[in-house]
Image (cartoon, rainbow, N blue to C red):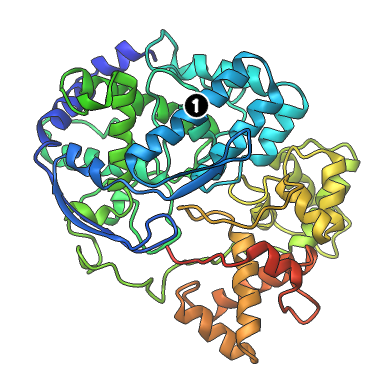
């Protein structure tokens, strides 16, 4: 589907008109907890989408090509910072300089506090394909061209995540939005409000995806009375996520073309990014909309995570065993994709007892793009990862410099977070019961069984990469890698 056909649909036309009419008058109760990204937190009541932008805050830092630090926090500072990154990336890609393009991409990820795409970017650059891939995706995702959504398919979109959405948005010149969990949550909530008031008929035409926050915030409109549940990033394909970025961009441009919002920002693409930044603020916690949640959670106060929260509980899996199995599978000529490995894992006779396909699927938890992105790795990288230790950690993170671990705004890197939680629990507590209780009281798990599942994976991954010793206590590498990293949202 092309832009004109998408925007001509009656429900889409009505949604755009509703946004134009209602966004200047809606009120929002912004309540941000203090965090590394929002030092001191935020408490503000605002009216109208344009007023939200003044409360944008994302404390970030990255290094330019001369190793000089570029810091930002407010929207004005962020605009300048992203402008520099955009210029660096665009210049490198246009020159076909993959190594400079890679460095620009890595600094974009550093600004965004995400790292999952690093191995993928390194693979593209090593094969001399990074610049051409970004140029191809720019053509497919442009907001003002004749591109068709159907061209964003499983072949053209090799990967998409919270890091790549930033890279594609910055390389784009038409105003394509950064589509992360916050932005998806906010537009999804606005669409839910629209559907409550719309007099039309039929099932909802839009289903904006989102993802879980790493704190206690709500980022799924489905958590509210009559809210529409958002598909989660972890359950959709790469190309589906990319298509929603384009759809949202089309909608934003259409709204701004009929309003004068964010005129002081400059041309239409800059206004689009200001609109996106405002959605980013609103999506921190959807309770800011004041809509009744399904559970009795106060709209204004943001409590600590409940004891029954999913916290940082992983899908249980024997990490060390499964990555050894995957290396064997690849050495035998197996394809580097999940379906093929799951088939092999559930039928291969070397296991003491057969495992079900569902169990084999669970065993691939650490292989996902939200974790270590282990599919498609080279045999050389897999051998280093399986060997473990600090070199294995460098290989699995595709970061020879091994920069200190950082956490972004979303619930990703669960395996490594569980190592950190486990190591600190063993550091503080001397008994198993005390460690479990400390994990429960912090909200990282909701039951004793889930707390033990968390620590089992933490011990396994931690020992494999030399982050924990034989007594599961933090090693010097643990302290160097995790440093002062905090789980406070």
Image quadrant for the C terminus? bottom left
On screen, 356 above or below 245?
below
Nearer to us in this view, 293 or 71: 71
> For residue 195, which quarter of the picture?
top left
Q: Tell which of 478 and 215 is nearer to you.
A: 478
**In the drawing, does residue 431 fall left or right of residue 146?**
right
Q: Is residue 6 left or right of residue 359?
A: left
Residue found at x 58% / y 90%: 433
Which residue is painted at 62% across and 69% down in the image? 420
- Residue 234, visible in the rendered structure: no
User: Is residue 477 in view?
Assistant: yes
**Residue 16: % across, % down:** 19, 26
Report the residue at 58% width, 36% height from top: 64
Residue 243 position by quadrant: top left
Q: Position of residue 6 (x, y in %)?
A: 31, 17
Q: Is residue 275 left or right of residue 369?
A: left
Rendered view: 64 above or below 272? below
Out of 358 and 311, give the one closest to the viewer. Answer: 311
Note whether 93 is above or below 334 in the view shown.
Answer: above
Query: How far across and down, in percent of the image, does residue 174 sit?
Result: 39, 18
Say which element carries label 1. helix
How many labels, in total? 1
Residue highlighted by disc 1: 86
Which quarter of the image is occupied by the N terminus?
top left
In the image, residue 184 lies at what x, y percent? 36, 41
Quarter of the rendering containing residue 38: bottom left
Q: Residues within 10 Å of mark 1 (few under 14, many from 20)?
A: many
Taking depth in this image into account, of 405 and 217 the one nearest to the observer is 405
Q: Residue at x 30, y 11 (%)?
A: 4
């Amino acid at each position: 589907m092309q832009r004109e056909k998408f925007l001509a649909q009656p429900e889409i036309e009505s949604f755009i008109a509703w946004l134009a009419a209602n966004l200047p008058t809606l009120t929002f109760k912004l309540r941000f907890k203090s965090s590394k990204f929002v030092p001191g937190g935020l408490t503000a009541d605002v009216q109208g989408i344009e007023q939200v932008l003044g409360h944008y805050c994302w404390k970030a830092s990255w290094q330019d090509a001369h190793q000089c630090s570029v810091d930002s926090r407010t929207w004005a500072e962020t605009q300048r910072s992203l402008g520099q990154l955009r210029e660096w990336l665009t210049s490198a890609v246009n020159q076909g300089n993959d190594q400079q393009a890679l460095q620009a991409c890595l600094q974009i990820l550093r600004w965004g506090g995400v790292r999952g795409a690093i191995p993928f970017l390194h693979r593209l650059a090593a094969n001399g394909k990074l610049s051409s891939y970004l140029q191809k995706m720019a053509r497919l995702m442009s907001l003002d061209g004749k591109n068709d959504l159907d061209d964003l398919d499983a072949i053209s979109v090799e990967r998409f995540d919270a890091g790549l959405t930033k890279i594609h948005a910055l390389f784009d010149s038409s105003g394509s939005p950064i589509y992360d969990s916050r932005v998806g949550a906010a537009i999804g909530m606005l669409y839910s409000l629209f559907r409550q008031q719309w007099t039309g008929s039929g099932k909802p035409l839009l289903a904006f995806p989102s993802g879980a926050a790493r704190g206690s915030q709500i980022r799924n409109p489905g958590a509210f009375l009559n809210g529409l549940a958002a598909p989660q990033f972890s359950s959709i394909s790469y190309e589906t996520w990319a298509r929603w970025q384009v759809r949202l961009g089309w909608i934003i441009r259409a709204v701004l073309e009929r309003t004068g919002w964010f005129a002081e920002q400059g041309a239409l693409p800059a206004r689009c990014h200001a609109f996106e930044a405002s959605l980013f603020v609103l999506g921190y916690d959807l309770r800011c909309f004041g809509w009744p949640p399904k559970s009795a959670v106060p709209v204004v106060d943001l409590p600590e995570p409940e004891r029954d929260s999913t916290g940082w509980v992983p899908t249980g899996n024997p990490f060390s065993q499964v990555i050894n199995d995957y290396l064997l599978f690849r050495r035998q000529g197996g394809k580097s994709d999940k379906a093929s490995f799951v088939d092999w894992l559930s039928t291969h006779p070397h296991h003491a007892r057969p495992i079900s396909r569902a169990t084999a699927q669970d065993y691939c938890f650490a292989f996902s793009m939200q974790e270590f992105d282990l599919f498609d790795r080279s045999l050389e990288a897999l051998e280093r990862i399986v060997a473990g230790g600090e070199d294995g950690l460098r290989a699995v993170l595709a970061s020879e410099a091994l920069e200190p671990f950082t956490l972004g705004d979303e619930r990703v890197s669960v395996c490594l977070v569980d190592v950190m939680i486990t190591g600190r629990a063993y550091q503080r507590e001397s008994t198993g019961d005390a460690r479990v209780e400390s994990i429960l009281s912090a909200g990282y798990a909701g039951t004793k069984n889930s707390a033990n599942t968390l620590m089992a994976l933490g011990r396994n991954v931690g020992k494999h990469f030399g982050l924990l010793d034989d007594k599961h206590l933090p090693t010097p590498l643990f302290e160097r890698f995790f440093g002062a990293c905090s789980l406070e949202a």
